[in-house]
Image (cartoon, grey):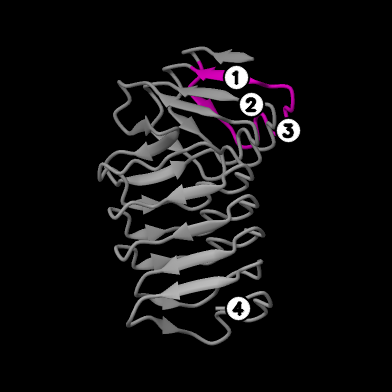
Amino acid sequence: SITIPDSVTSIGYYAFEDCSGLTSIAIGNGVTSIEWNTFDGCSALTSITIGNGVTSIGNTVFTDCSSLKNISVDPDNKVYHSAGNCIIETETGTLIAGCNNSMIPNDGSVTNIGSNAFENCSGLTSVNIPDSVTAIGFAAFRDCSGLTSITIPDSVTTIDDSAFSGCSALTSVTMPTIAISYIPKTNLQTVVLTSGSSIESYAFYNCSKLIN
């Protein structure tokens, strides 16, 4: 475990990458920025606390943190807050990071699922996307290999590339009325589309297990 003191103001790229024995970390209130991939591959990390001074968190900060269960943000932080074991950028309503047991808040505080937010959360088996969400970012659920089904509400108007790429256990998807450009090559068996959906070329290419 490690506690980063208030005298530290920035944590750089890949600073703790592949520290496989690290189980918990507390980030001091002096830290203002956490760069990309800071804790990438910290497979034993179970909890992390973000201090009140953090104003910038890069993408894929917790990629491959397969044991992460508890995420919290100091309640005095002016930029981010935590709810349901998720980190949310308060002003934009963007969920920027989650973990295997995250629950997306349904109180209207989340309007976007950010890029790479749940990437490699292999223990995530189900997810409820609330009606407040309008966009799902690039690789948001990429390599969530335990995810079996997902319902995307009609409020969602944009799903970026690779959002569900590598979700090898995904068998059922219910989609809203949007243009569908690509469905990852998974074990997908069932797709439910609402009226008015448009399907672009090769959207379901090579989905060999699709039966209805």
Q: Which residue is mark 1?
A: 24
Which residues are the magenta region? Answer: 8-27
What residue would you read off at disc 2?
45
How many numbered discs sit on the rendered protein?
Answer: 4
Q: Residues within 10 Å of mark 1 (few under 14, many from 20)?
A: some
Q: Which residue has dot 4 on it?
A: 211
Q: CA distance from mark 2 to mark 1?
A: 6 Å
Task: State whether residue 155 is above or below residue 50.
Answer: below
Answer left or right for 139 relative to 135: right
Mark toward the viewer: 3 or 1: 1
The secondary structure type at the circle numbered 4 is loop
Q: Amino acid at mark 3?
A: Asp
Give the quarter of the image for residue 25. top right
Q: Relative to the observer, which residue lies in front, 39 or 72?
A: 72
Question: What is the distance, in whole Å, between disc 4 and disc 2 at their CAs?
Answer: 40 Å
* Dots 3, 1 in contact, CB < 8 A: no
Nearest to N terminus: mark 2 or mark 3: 3
Query: Is residue 26 magenta-colored?
Result: yes
Is residue 189 shown left or right of residue 127? Answer: right
Question: Which residue does the image show at 30% across and 44% down from the upper left?
Answer: 106
Residue 141 in the image, given as x and y percentages of width and height: 54, 54
Q: Which residue is mark 3?
A: 18
| Whole-percent x, y for residue 122 in the image | 64, 45
